[in-house]
Image (cartoon, rainbow, N blue to C red):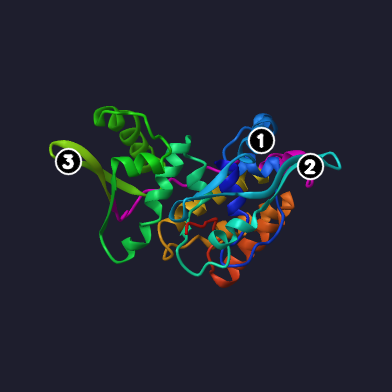
């Protein structure tokens, strides 16, 4: 799931299929909260599993391949994942002007299980309605929700389903993402038949500013300087994504932007340097990760 979503974050769904997408282990480990020492084994295993997966089109009772190809390989001694989305799902991922959901990698990396990620995506797609309302109602029957979470045939009793899935998943989403969710069950002939989720607008959510490392005593261009700049850039990037996730009216301090540009120069992170320079010059938001949901 993380590999699939990270691959989707590398493309912009308002444009056409970009062709081959490349995922580098170090970048994946950094953005998806995976330890670098385990990332190669994690990616190799994930590629094998996800290559066998298909996309189920519920409206057409159809299954189609997600990727034209996906492979873990080494080129000139450097490992990478190369993939291309299949033409069968282009209509659901590219050239979209509506019916898609924007999410942040910063949220995804804090979620630990597939069920947590699926529940987050199911609720996140309704968040845009909070621009017009204080709360948004999202309702599923038990059968529908279990099917969407891919846990059919389990948790026969509502009490077990609530204790084992719904309560801990919603607690996790409330604690680590920008969503605030409440839920309750509803019944049909005294038997619980569905779950009613209520999304609430987050007001004044507190975000703790990270404590940056002081520059070590070292020469310019040294490994110590590189590690220091990379660490501080990562801390500020996650912090800035959390700020922007609270709403487009949120602003990022210009001095912090200048720091990030300096860190990006030291680490030769050209993409981050460009994004922060655009933010400083035009006030445009940082590049968003996009998950397309048709």
Q: Which residue is mark 1?
A: 48
Magenta residues, start to end: 199-228
Alpha carbons under labels 1 and 2: distance apart: 38 Å
Residue 3 placement (x, y as % from top left):
60, 43
User: In the current view of this chain or complex, which residue is farthest to the front?
Assistant: 61
Q: Work out whether mark 1 precedes mark 2 in sequence or the reverse, and give the earlier one.
A: 1
Disc number at residue 222?
2
Alpha carbons under labels 3 and 2: distance apart: 65 Å
Q: Work out whether mark 3 precedes mark 1 in sequence or the reverse, and give the earlier one.
A: 1
Q: Which residue is mark 3?
A: 187
Position of the N terminus by quadrant: top right
Q: Main secondary structure of the magenta part?
A: loop
Q: Is residue 156 above or below residue 58?
A: above
203 part of magenta stretch: yes
Q: Is residue 145 left or right of residue 8?
A: left
What's the residue at 50%, 60% (across, down)? Answer: 252
Q: Is residue 148 above or below residue 289?
A: above
Q: Name which quarter of the figure residue 15 lies in.
A: bottom right
Residue 137 placement (x, y as % from top left):
26, 54
Residue 30 placement (x, y as % from top left):
62, 41
In the image, 276 versus 141, the foreground residue is 141
């Amino acid at each position: 799931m993380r590999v699939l979503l990270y691959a989707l974050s590398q493309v912009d769904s308002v444009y056409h299929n970009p062709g081959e997408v490349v995922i580098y282990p170090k970048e994946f480990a950094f953005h998806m909260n995976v330890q670098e020492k385990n990332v190669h084994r994690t990616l190799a295993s994930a590629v094998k599993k996800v290559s066998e997966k298909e996309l189920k089109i519920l409206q057409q009772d159809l299954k189609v391949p997600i990727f034209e190809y996906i492979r873990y390989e080494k080129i000139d001694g450097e490992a990478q994942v190369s993939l291309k989305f299949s033409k069968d799902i282009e209509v659901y991922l590219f050239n979209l002007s509506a019916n898609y959901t924007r999410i942040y990698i910063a949220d995804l990396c804090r979620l630990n299980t597939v069920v947590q990620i699926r529940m987050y995506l199911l609720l996140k797609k309704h968040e845009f309605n909070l621009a017009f309302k204080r709360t948004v109602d999202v309702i599923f029957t038990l059968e529908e929700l279990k099917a969407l979470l891919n846990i059919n045939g389990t948790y026969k009793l509502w009490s077990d389903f609530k204790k084992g899935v719904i309560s801990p998943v919603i607690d996790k989403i409330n604690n680590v993402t920008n969503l605030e969710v409440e839920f309750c069950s509803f019944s049909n002939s005294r038997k619980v038949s569905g779950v009613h989720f209520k999304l609430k607008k987050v007001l004044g959510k507190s975000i703790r500013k990270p404590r940056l490392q002081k520059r070590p005593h070292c020469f310019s261009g040294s490994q110590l300087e590189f590690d220091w700049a990379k660490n501080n850039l990562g801390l500020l990037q996650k912090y800035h994504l959390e700020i922007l996730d609270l709403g487009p009216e949120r602003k990022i301090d210009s001095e912090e932007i200048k720091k990030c540009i300096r860190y990006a120069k030291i680490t030769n992170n050209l993409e981050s340097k460009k994004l922060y320079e655009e933010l400083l010059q035009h006030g445009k938001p940082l590049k968003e990760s996009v998950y397309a949901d048709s």
